Image (cartoon, helix red, strand yellow):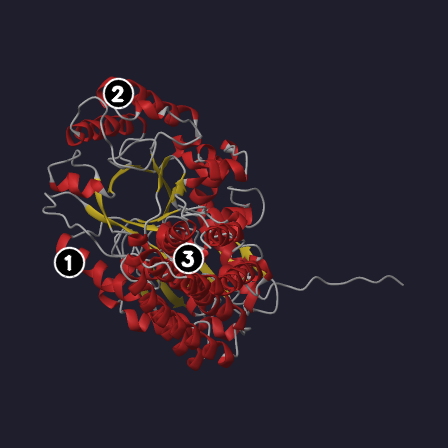
Amino acid sequence: MSSFSIEPSPICYVVIGKQVSKTEINVAEDLQKDLEKVLSGEVAVVNDINIVPEKAPAILIGTPQSNSLIATFNQSKINITTENPGPRGGIWSKVTSKKRKEIIVLAGSDVQGLQYAVYDYAQEILEIDPLQYWTGKEMSKKKAIDLFAFSERKIVPPKVPILCYFENDVDELANYRGKLLEYDWESYTEMINSLVRLRYNAIQLFDMLGRPEFFIRPEYKDLTDYKVDVDYVEKMIDYAQKKGMKVAIDFALGYQIHPMSADKATCWKDYKEDWLTAWRYYLEETPLRKTDIFILRPRHQVWDWEYESSCGESKIEVFNQVYKAFGDLVDEYKPNADKVLVCYSDGMEMWNNGFRPPKDWIVAWSDHGFGDFEHLPKATDGYNFGTYMHAGFWLNHTVHNPYPEKVESVMKDMFSTYDADKFCLVNGQNFRPFLLNIEAYSEVCNDPDNFEAASFYSKWTKRYFNDNSATLAVSSMKLLHEAQPNRIGYVQHLWEIREAISYLSDSPIQRPGKSPVSHDYNRVENDLEHVQVIQERINLAVKEAEKGLELATENETFFHDYIYLPAVLYQDLIQFERTLHQMSVLKKEYEDVPNEALLTDIKALLPQAKLQLKEIYENRNSGDKSAKWDNWYNPKIRRPNNGFPTFKMLEQIESNLNSKS
C-alpha cells in the first residue's frame, strides 16, 4: 500500500491586482502574515479572484490603478479615486458579486492610502499591534467571521503629508547584538515595518552613514575600529523605499561615507567648490543618489555645531548663498524633489534675523529637545512650514520622557498658529524606549482635531494591559515625566554626577575634544534642590509601576520592560546622585571649617555610594525580562554621551578624602 497526504487548502485569500508595485506586493505579504498569526490555517495571495473557492473569505486589496476588479467595483459598489479620499487616503468596504456573498475591499487612492487601509484593518480588526516586534504583545485567535466584523470606513489623508522618522543617536539599537554601530538587519527592518504601520512615510538616515564621532572621537575609537559599510547603507535605503517610505538625507559633509576636512567647513567663500564637489560625489558615487528628501541645516557642515566663519563672513549671508547653490544642485540631479531646511538650534535665530532660502524649501522649526520651543518664528513669509520634534533627546537618551500632553498642545498650536503642517521630522533616538511619544506624534500629525492626550494614553496602555494595570502605567509614566523637568533626563544626570565626583575627588572633568572643566562646588550646589524634588517624583513613579506590575494579567513582560524598568533605572541613578550630593555638602562644610568629624561623616557615606553604583550596574546588566533585549542596557555599549560613573572614580574620591586626614 502507498500512503499520501493531501495539502490543506488555504482558509483565506488575499487578492491583488495584476499591475502591482513592489510596495503593494509587500503590503499583501504583510497582510498574509498577519492573517496567519490569528487564523488557524494557511492564507494565500493570488491575483485572480476566480480561483478563490466560493466559501473562502476573500480580501481584495489595491488601488483602482493596480487592481482591475477594484476599478470595476468603483463604477457602482465603492467610491475611491485618486481625488477621493485623496493622496494617502483609503477605504474599507464589503461588496457582493454574482458568485460571492461578500468580499472585503481594502483600497487606497494611492499605494500609501492602501497601506493605511490594510495596516489599520490589521490593527483594529485582527488586533495586530503595529509595534508587536518591540512589545511582544500577545495575540488572540480569530475566526473567519471575525474578518467581516467592521463598518465601512473612509480613511482621510493625514494632516501632515510627510511624516519622517530621524534615526539619530542609535547606539543601543545598533550595538546590542551584531556588529557595533551597525544595525543588525532584523532590528532595522522591524523598525521600518513598525514605522510604516504608524503612518511614517519617510526616514532620515544619519548615524548609519558614519557620523564623524564614530571614527574620530576617542570613546568610539576605543569601542571599535569603525568602518561604514556602503553596500549595507544602499541595502537599507532599498528596503525603506520598497516599504513605500521616502529616504531623507541631511547632506552634511562629515559622514565617513565621504568625509570632507573640517577646516574646509568654516569658510564658504574659499571652499565653495569643495562643498559642491563633495555634494556631487554624494549624488554620483554613493547610495545617497537615491535620496528622495534633501535636508540641510544652516550649521557647520562637518560637526553639528554653529557655523563660525574663519574668514570674516556673515553666516546669514553664507547660508543664503549655500541654500541657493545646493538647491540648484538638487534640481539638476533630482528635479521636483522635496528640500527641507531644518532650523535646528541657532538656525531659528538666523531665520528671525533675515536668513531666507529659496521659496521651494520647506522650513522645519525645531523644538528644544523635549517637545517645547525656545524660539518661535517672527514670520513665516509664505514658506511651507513644518516641525522638527523629539520623541527622545540626547539628554534623556536612556530613559524615555512620556509627554503626550505636550505633543497635543504644542503640535496643535504649531498647526493653527503657523500652518506648520507640511512636514514633521521626529527624532526617535534609539527607538525602543521612545515608542509612546513616537506613536503620539504620528497620531497628532494624522488627525490633530481628534487627538487628545488623555484618551491616547488610555487607549495605548489598554492595548497591552488590563484596566487596572493600564491606569497605573499611565500614572507611573506621568510621574516619570514630572521627574524630568526643564530639559533634564538620565543623561543630564550623568553630567551632574560627573560634577559631583569632580568636586569630591578635587579633579577636573575631562572632555573629549574640549578643555577640562575644573572642579567647582557651585556646580554641585546648583543641582541640590531639583534633584531632591526629582527623587520624590521618581520614587512615586516606581511605586505606581510596582503596583501595576503586581496586577498585570497579560503582557507582564512588556509592563516590566517598558513601564517598570525605566523608572527603576532612573531611580537608581538619582539615589546615587543624592548620596554624592550629601557627601559634597559635607565636604564644603569641611572646607569652610575643617573638622575631623565631618570628614568621618563623608567617608561613612562611601560604602552606600558603592552599593548604589553596584545596583546601577546590576539593574542595567540584568535589564529586560524579554530575552530579545539582552545586553540593551549594558554600560559598555551605551552611547558615551556625558560618560558613566565607575568604581575607579569612587576610589579616587576615597583616596582624596584619605589624603586630607
Q: What whole-number distance in Å separates the C-alpha atoms at marks 1 and 2?
A: 39 Å
Tell me the element at label 2: helix
Task: Mark 2: give few (<14), some (14-19) or many (20+) Cα within 10 Å.
Answer: some
Looking at the rendered structure, the kind of residue marked 1 is: Ser
Q: Nearer the viewer, residue 47 or 146?
A: 146
What residue lies at 20% left-to-right and 30% top-to-bottom? 319
Residue displayed at 43% across by 57% down: 61
* Residue 488 x/y as whole percent: 32, 57
Q: Which mark is residue 272?
A: 2
Secondary structure of residue under mark 1: helix
Mark toward the viewer: 1 or 2: 2
Quarter of the image for the N terminus: give it. Answer: bottom right
Residue 255: which quarter of the image? top left
Please name the residue that numbered disc 1 is placed on: 416
Q: Looking at this view, is 15 or 633 the one in front?
A: 633
Query: Could you say which is closer to the camera, residue 144 or residue 347?
Result: 347
Q: Three-letter amino acid code at disc 3? A: Arg
Q: Which secondary structure lies at badge 3?
A: helix
- Determine whether, in the image, residue 28 is placed left or right of residue 200: right
| Disc 1/disc 3 C-alpha distance (Å) | 26 Å
Q: Are marks 3 and 2 in contact (CB under 8 Å)?
A: no
Residue bearing the label numbered 3: 197
Report if residue 483 is visible in the image: no
Q: Determine the residue positioned at 53% across, 55% down.
A: 632
Q: Are marks 1 and 2 in contact (CB under 8 Å)?
A: no
- Residue under the point 49% across and 38% down: 220
